[in-house]
Amino acid sequence: MSLAVRVIPCLDVADGRVVKGVNFQNLADAGDPVELAARYAAQGADELTFLDVTATVESRGTTYDVVTRTAEQVFVPLTVGGGVRSAEDVARLLGSGADKIGVNSAAIRRPDLVGEIADRFGAQVVVLSLDVTRAEGTPSGFVVTTHGGRTVTRIDALEWAREAIERGAGELLVNSIDADGTKNGFDLDLIEAMRGVSSVPVIASGGAGQPAHFAPAIRAGADAVLAASVFHSGQLSIGEVKAAMKDEGIGVR
């Protein structure tokens, strides 16, 4: 675990707007991405993550103008994912102002993509985004999904994480589809399992609902915590989350 835990708001973007649903379904408008990004930066966000949640489904690239406008106004590290299919896509996103790139569906379809990006830009740029759900009949009981959680594979999530790290992934963004948007807390079993196979930082995502939910995720093995709807709605502020973890003896920035 890193010395200082990162708190990362996630902005799921569709058609240039931030959206949020439950278990990746029934997406509702949550605001302008640039305005929200600026708000979170002012609150003390350590990083920001933009995920274009419909880019893969609609077979198009990420919304580059949103990335550019955000990078021009917000000066915290920015991870961007959704619709990334090639090293050329990565080059364009980095040129638009992104600092790290999330890959998911395209890397599952063609695992060599992970190494191609890492070799060209460095492992620190590659964030393997895993949308994970529980499933019987696999070694770990967890499988990855693609296309924004719409397609369930039979690929064991831990085996895929291990392989991607060997290929050059520098960080894991582990999102529990089962917990996503429920506000019932992170999937601690999933975090602990990923920590057991990962030699790189693990970002826990999915399920945050109150300040008390974040410290257990760190104790389970996460290096950073990510949340979306609780920040978008104003239910929680980044300062409240950091204060709650600090009260639990966890170092924050």
Image (cartoon, grey):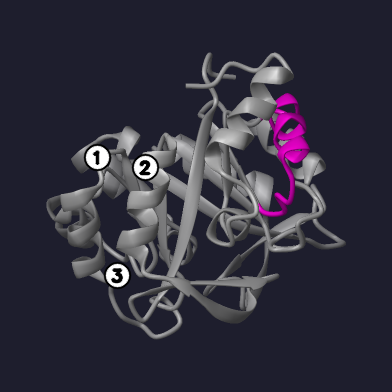
Q: Is residue 28 left or right of residue 36?
A: right
| Label at residue 41 | 2
Task: Tell us which disc is closer to us: 2 or 3.
Answer: 2
Task: Name the spot of residue 199 as percent of width and height, x first.
Answer: 55, 26
| Label at residue 75 | 1
Q: Is residue 6 left or right of residue 198?
A: left
Residue 121 vs 96, above or below: the answer is above
Mark nearer the N terminus (3 vs 1): 3
Q: State how far apart marks 2 and 3 are (Cα).
A: 22 Å
Residue for point 36% across, 81% down? 15
Q: State how far apart marks 1 and 2 are (Cα).
A: 8 Å
Residue 12 vs 192, above or below: the answer is below
Q: State how far apart marks 3 and 1 are (Cα).
A: 20 Å
Task: Tell us which disc is closer to us: 3 or 1.
Answer: 1
Residue for point 70% across, 49% down? 208
Q: Which residues are magenta?
A: 206-221
Quarter of the N terminus within the rendering: top right
* Mark 2 residue type: Ala
Q: Is residue 24 left or right of residue 111?
A: right
Q: Secondary structure at mark 1?
A: loop
Mark nearer the N terminus (2 vs 3): 2
> Mark 3 sits on what residue?
62
Residue 127: which quarter of the image?
top left
Q: Would you say the residues marked 3 and 1 are in contact, meaning their CB atoms lie under 8 Å apart?
A: no
* Mark 1 residue type: Phe
